[in-house]
Amino acid sequence: QKEVEQNSGPLSVPEGAIASLNCTYSDRGSQSFFWYRQYSGKSPELIMSIYSNGDKEDGRFTAQLNKASQYVSLLIRDSQPSDSATYLCAAPRRGAGSYQLTFGKGTKLSVIP
Amino acid sequence: DGGITQSPKYLFRKEGQNVTLSCEQNLNHDAMYWYRQDPGQGLRLIYYSQIVNDFQKGDIAEGYSVSREKKESFPLTVTSAQKNPTAFYLCASSMFDEQFFGPGTRLTVL
């Protein structure tokens, strides 16, 4: 089983709608999770970090962590065309002694005007 | 301005050549990383370094080499032994578990 899995999409939502991006992970011991946004041709940008069960909100973005079910999600409210990008989920790498992360392959989001 | 810089932005290599990609950070981060990204693929770890003068192989280190002589710098050399080096190369740094990325270098083999 891959350590971090994401649906590759593409996920298409109309402008103004809520986009929901999901990620599952295999290591029950993982304590921290990260969402990165990557525009086409650009490098990943860290947009959310979450360390405890429940929701964490930052502007239009909400990260949700459910450790019992081993999934983490990212909700984008009032989606804008500028949110169109690939979103990468990351978690600490199992068994690594350093701050290594393992990344999902990403979900491509398209927001339709 | 704190951040991570990578140069060059684009790099073209002929068969049999070694090329070196630069990565510099002024965030005072201890750890630095090199990833490779191919179309439709996730990020794959090439090398990482937790402290100066120490570095470890990642998942795809064959054909690559690195050095870490200064905290701020972590250059990556793509050697002629790397058979398929055309890719987007990303450098990252971290103090703890949040990693921050540089703008990347796109390497093309001619």
Image: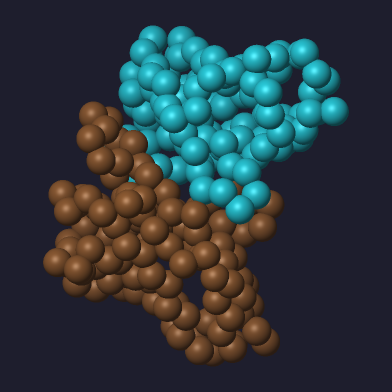
Chain colours: A brown, B cyan
Up/down of B96 relative to A59, above or below:
above
- Give the total number of marks visible in the rendering: 0
Rendered residue at 56%/57% (across/down): A38
Up/down of A40 relative to B53, above or below:
below
Up/down of A39 relative to B87, above or below:
below
Position of the C terminus of chain B, as image quadrant, is: top right
Looking at the picture, tell me which residue is in the foreground, A26 or B71. A26
Rendered residue at 62%/24% (across/down): B22
Up/down of A105 relative to B108, above or below:
below
**Can you tell which quarter of the image residue A13 is in?**
bottom right
- Is residue B104 shown left or right of residue B33? right
Rendered residue at 32%/52% (across/down): A1
Rendered residue at 46%/67% (across/down): A7
- Is residue B25 shown left or right of residue A68? right
Residue B3 in view (yes/no): no
Q: Position of residue B44 (x, y in %)?
A: 49, 38
Q: Position of residue B64 (x, y in %)?
A: 57, 18
Q: Position of residue B99 (x, y in %)?
A: 40, 42
Q: Residue furthest front?
A: A1
**Can you tell which quarter of the image residue B79 is in?**
top right
Residue B55 in view (yes/no): yes
**Can you tell which quarter of the image residue A65 is in?**
bottom left
